[in-house]
Image (spheres, rainbow, N blue to C red):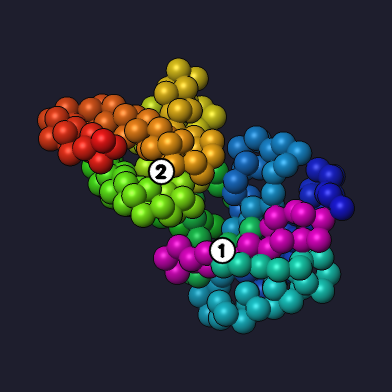
Amino acid sequence: MTYTPTERSTLRDALVAEARADARITGAALTGSAAIGAEDEWSDIDLALGLAADADQSSTVADWTSTMYAEHGAIHHTDVWSGRTIYRVFLLDSTLQVDIAFAPSGAFGALGPTFQLLFGEAAEQPAGSTPNPVDLIGMGWLYALHARSSIARGKAWQAEYMISGVRDHVLMLMCLRHGVPHSQGRGLHLLPAATTATVEPTLVRSLDADELRRAFRASVDVLLDEVAQVDADLAVRLTRTLRELTA
């Protein structure tokens, strides 16, 4: 069973109507792709709800959760916290994902450009932080160290995981450099093809030891290239040591 865009819109409208009727909720906003008119057939539902000052967050979330299961076909959910706001993410039997943020008083407001107020008032929120490229570089060489030891120990699956970790941090560095979203791969499709082409050799094609070593060398190559874009002196300091990992 899959959902249609019409079914998604109908459910979203119903949820917004339920929010308007809930005295504990003082505001609602579209977030995600719908807030900027960028939905496609695979988009999920993203809503942010602002709670009244006297509303109990736990009981409000519990009541909405019961409704999602009883009336809207939820089969499971998981939570993500950001500050005092809980994002309850529901999986529906139709495969539709529904993300509902429950923000306590004062925490309801735009955290980025994907925020379209539907009703109520939004409070200005602190600007979101951007990762420090040097921190990403540090995580990159940390994964590289463990990739080397995993290969040496014959732990093929762990080696693949660590090589992928190097690549993931290289891609985040590229996203920051090109000014596109860096989180969860959301901006990777916006990177120039010539940029992402340099990362393709890092993909592990099998768990054969020689293949793992090849992909590992490629991952160190692109990591060092990206380090040089951030700090040329740091790239010089890291080059000999990181090359030794792949020897």
Q: Does residue 14 appear in the picture of this structure?
A: no
* Dot label at residue 163: 2
Looking at the picture, how far across and down is residue 219, in whole percent? Answer: 37, 35
**Residue 176 image offset from top left, x and y in percent:** 36, 35
Tag 2: amino acid? Ile
Whether residue 76 appears in magenta in the rendering, the answer is: no
In this rendering, the answer to whether 107 lies above or below 46 is below
Residue under the point 42% across and 65% down: 83
Q: Please name the residue shown 45% across and 69% down the image.
A: 84
**Where residue 87 is drawn, which disc sits there?**
1
Give neighbour class at mark 2: few <14, some 14-19, many 20+ (Cα, 10 Å). many
Query: Which comes before the other along the chain, label 2 or label 1?
Result: 1
Kindly report the secondary structure that dominates the magenta region of the rendered protein.
strand
> How far is disc 2 from disc 1 in space, using C-alphas?
31 Å
Pick the front one: 128 or 185: 185
Q: What residue type is labelled 1?
A: Tyr
List x then y, in percent, for residue 30. Answer: 63, 50
- In percent of the image, x 77 and y 54: which residue is there? 95
Mark nearer the viewer, 2 or 1:
2
**Relative height, residue 149 to residue 106 (above, below):** above
Q: What stretch is highlighted in magenta?
A: 80-98
**Relative to residue 114, is residue 42 drawn left or right?**
right
